[in-house]
């Protein structure tokens, strides 16, 4: 047996010198699979989400794409849109007794009300984020520079010793 | 960092990535509404008994479905252009770091004050310690100070590569013979992972990038130790 057959580094699969290369490759791949299985044990999506995302359940996504739980303003917009859709559709039906047209009005109302609430909420949210950033920077600067010569609130002291 | 079954973007670390996340939410809401409308129209088409085989023109609906998409595109384009120009601003960087792409590793040079350069190779799977991330860990991380604007100069020694860190909203091509520039600023400390994003050979998937954002004092200590 050649020296270093079992003491070689893992990147050099043992037995490569005296075993056909495809068998060595198969052995190496099996080793990698078992190592990967040991490092990443198979767990369900729910358990992984619970461990790493601290959630009791998977996030709920409307139509599979819109995460209404985590996107700011999404939940409110969709709920107001649904309310607007029901009001518009029902109101149109009560006025005209036309079912299909009332459904169309309902869908149109949903889209318009959702979009309107979305833009209104996102605009206010953007203003709030800017104010938060200004406040955060202000607090940080106050902590850093309070009572130093860079403190803007510090009153300049007059030199009483000058004659 | 990314996690299994992930569908959305990673959490933002830089202000630019925050803006990109919000733009993504904005575009996604518009996509959701259009998808709802299309699903509704499909359900109408499938449930009607009416047919009309002699349609010659439909001026009203054609006007609506020309003007409405134009308005939607404008609503998407305006914030998109705003972020595009915001990404190109250079805000007086405090530090310059050069990164060179090789087959198949990255090398980094901190030459502002001292001559510091090192290579960053991926840690092979069999050498990982428990808890480390497969195909993402490197032997030498890029240590950078947080809450400071840093200029990254990116190029390549051989073939095309791309230096990407999704959490910071960065992806810049490393082109041989060309110097590309990007600026980064991380608002919080931590480890941020990325991978080469331009096909560059057999080990293209095995040359990750790891940024270690630390307070300035730690960065000064680290750079003094590394020199």
Image (cartoon, coloured by chain):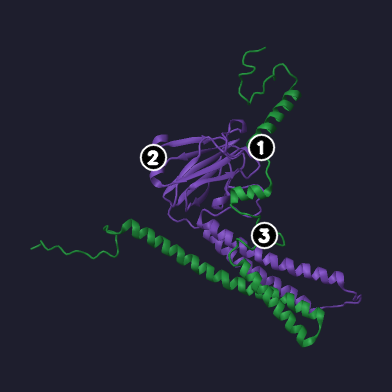
Residue hosting label 1: B201
Q: Which residue is mark 3?
A: A60
Alpha carbons under labels 2 and 1: distance apart: 37 Å
Q: Colour of chain B?
A: purple
Query: Which chain hosts label 2?
Result: B
A6 is higher (above) or lower (below) than B72: above
- Say above or below: B138 vs A94: above
Tag 3 near tag 1, CB within 8 Å: no
Front position among marks 2 and 1: 2
Specify the farthest residue to the bottom.
A95
Residue A40, given in percent of the width and then of the height, sits at 64, 39
Q: Are marks 2 and 3 in one subunit?
A: no
Q: Residue furthest front?
A: A56
The lab-note entry on whether marks 2 and 1 share a chain reads yes
What crowding class fits label 1: few (fewer than 14 Cα within 10 Å), some (14-19), or many (20 or more)?
few
Colour chosen for chain A: green
Residue B119 place in picture, x, y as percent: 52, 35
Query: Disc 3 sits on a residue from what chain?
Result: A
Question: Residue A78 versus residue A159: which sits nearer the camera?
Answer: A78
Tell us which disc is closer to us: 2 or 3: 3
Q: Which residue is mark 2?
A: B221
Question: Please, what secondary structure does the residue beneath circle 2 have?
Answer: helix
- The chain letter for the residue carrying disc 1 is B
Crowd tier of the residue under label 2, counting other residues whose Cα lies within 10 Å: few below 14, some 14–19, many 20 or above: few
């Amino acid at each position: 047996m050649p020296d270093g057959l079992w003491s070689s580094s893992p990147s050099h699969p043992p037995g490569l010198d005296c075993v056909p290369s495809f068998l060595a490759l198969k052995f190496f791949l099996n080793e990698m699979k078992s190592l990967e299985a040991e490092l990443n044990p198979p767990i369900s999506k729910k358990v992984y989400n619970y461990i790493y995302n601290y959630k009791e359940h998977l996030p709920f996504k409307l139509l599979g794409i819109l995460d209404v739980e985590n996107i700011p303003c999404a939940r409110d917009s969709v709920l107001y849109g649904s309310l607007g859709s029901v009001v518009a559709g029902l109101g149109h039906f009560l006025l005209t007794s036309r079912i299909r047209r009332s459904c169309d009005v309902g869908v149109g109302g949903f889209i318009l009300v959702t979009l309107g609430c979305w833009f209104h909420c996102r605009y206010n949210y953007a203003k709030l984020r800017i104010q938060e950033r200004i406040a955060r920077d202000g607090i940080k600067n106050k902590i850093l520079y309070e009572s130093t010569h860079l403190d803007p609130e510090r009153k300049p002291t007059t030199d009483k010793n000058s004659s | 960092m990314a996690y299994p079954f992930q569908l959305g973007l990673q959490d933002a670390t830089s202000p630019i990535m925050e803006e990109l996340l919000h733009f993504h939410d904005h575009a996604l809401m518009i996509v959701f509404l259009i998808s709802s409308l299309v699903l509704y129209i499909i359900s109408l088409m499938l449930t009607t008994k009416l047919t009309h085989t002699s349609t010659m023109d439909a001026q009203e609906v054609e006007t609506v479905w020309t003007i409405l998409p134009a308005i939607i595109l404008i609503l998407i384009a305006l914030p998109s252009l705003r972020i595009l120009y915001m990404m190109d601003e250079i805000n007086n960087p405090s530090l310059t770091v050069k990164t060179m792409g090789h087959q198949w590793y990255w090398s980094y040079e901190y030459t502002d004050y001292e001559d510091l350069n090192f290579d960053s190779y991926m840690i092979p799977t069999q050498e990982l310690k428990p808890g480390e991330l497969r195909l993402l860990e490197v032997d030498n991380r890029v240590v950078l100070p947080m809450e400071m604007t840093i200029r990254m100069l990116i190029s390549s020694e051989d073939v095309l590569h791309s230096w990407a860190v999704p959490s910071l909203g960065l992806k810049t091509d490393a082109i041989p013979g060309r110097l590309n520039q990007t600026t980064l600023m991380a608002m919080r400390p931590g480890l941020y992972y990325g991978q080469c994003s331009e096909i560059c050979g057999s080990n293209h998937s095995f040359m990750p990038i790891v940024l270690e954002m630390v307070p300035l004092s730690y960065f000064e200590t680290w750079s003094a130790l590394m020199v």
